[in-house]
Image (cartoon, rainbow, N blue to C red):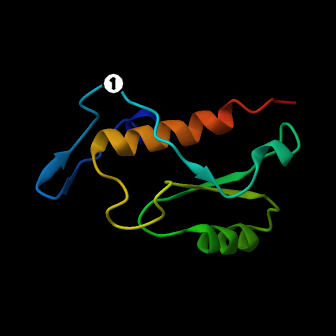
Amino acid sequence: MFQETAGFTPAKIKGGQLWVKPTNIITPTPLVLSSPVADLPTGIEMALALAISADPTEDVRRHIASTGLNLPIITAYLPGGVSNASVTSCDHAYGFRWRSATSLARLPGP
């Protein structure tokens, strides 16, 4: 996701494995959304929080409140819940990011 927007490639070593970019075709990862997006008005702005090793929803809520914005927050979770071991590989991380972005991008616009 970062290299698509900022022009750099993040890397991480996890469990002795170097995670730089996906090695295979990305398989969309199943996810759970905190709110039914079908209930949102079309064309609405929202905040998307990706919950991987911790749930950021309250931090995002506080930040949005401090800006004076009034946005609904949709949190995407992996089906197994949040933990340091919830993402098992670089491909899994990209699949989660891809599914999160495309699930909301397919919502009808204004």
Q: Is residue 9 in view from this perspective? A: no
Whether 26 is drawn above or below 52: the answer is above
| 104 vs 43, nearest the viewer | 104
Q: Residue at x 38, y 36 (%)?
A: 3
71 with respect to 98 (left or right)? right
Left or right, 48 with respect to 14, comes to right
Is 77 above or below relative to 31? below
Give the residue at mark 1. Answer: 25
Q: Can you see residue 107?
A: yes
Residue at horizontal 46 percent and vertical 65 percent from the top: 82
Q: Residues within 10 Å of mark 1 (few under 14, many from 20)?
A: few
- Considering every residue shown, the one lying at the far top of the view is 25
Give the residue at x 34% y 66%: 84
Q: Position of residue 45 (x, y in %)?
A: 78, 46
Looking at the rendered structure, the kind of residue marked 1 is: Ile
Identify the image quadrant of the N terminus.
top left
Screen quadrant of the C terminus: top right
Q: Quadrant of residue 108?
A: top right
- Horizontal and vertical percent for residue 47? 68, 54
